[in-house]
Image (cartoon, rainbow, N blue to C red):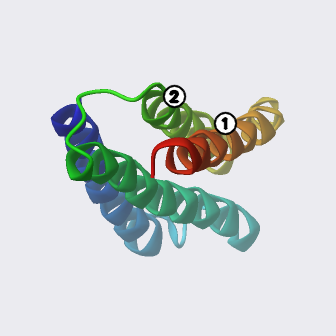
Amino acid sequence: MAKLIMLIAGISGGLSVMLGAFAAHGLKKKISPDMMSVFRTGVDYQFYHSFALALVGLSLIAQSIEQSMYLTWAFVFFAVGIIFFSGSLYLLALTQKKIFGPITPLGGLFFILGWGAFTLHWVNYG
């Protein structure tokens, strides 16, 4: 499980860098400054939570455990949060369709749940 989490963390982190570069060089003249800010917020949160995924994977490795219910949930919540939060912001910025806006807070909720599960693991097993 730790290897899978680290793989996903690495892919997500690499995608964050690529999307940030795409925004800086490919989108600059194609979308408004407001939408550029929206896109960059998606990149920032994806990048931060790629590190969070890596922390979850490293926590599994450091404690020599194959699985922890709380770390498993933290992984799921962080991954879903990246998809919902950052993904909805990318789609909103690129399409300017407001239908994607309401998905963003749901992604934020998943981030909060991920941090909660991560904290519960360390409170109970750290």
Q: Amino acid at mark 2?
A: Trp
Query: What residue sits right under mark 2 in the picture?
Result: 73
The CA span between labels 1 and 2 is 10 Å
Residue 71, above or below 31: above
- In percent of width and height, residue 45 lies at 56, 59
- In percent of width and height, residue 43 lies at 51, 60
The image quadrant that residue 17 belongs to is bottom left
Badge 2 element: helix
- Left or right: residue 86 versus residue 5 is right
- In percent of width and height, residue 74 lies at 51, 37
Q: Nearer the viewer, mark 1 or mark 2?
A: 2
Q: In the rendered picture of this protein, how many numbered marks are placed on residues?
A: 2
Residue 107, above or below 47: above
Q: Residue at x 46, y 44 (%)?
A: 125
Circle 2 packing at 10 Å, graded few (<14), some (14-19), many (20+), is some
Circle 1 packing at 10 Å, graded few (<14), some (14-19), many (20+), is many
Query: What residue sits right under mark 1 in the picture?
Result: 110
Residue 46, above or below 75: below
Q: Which residue is more in the foreground, 12 or 78?
A: 78
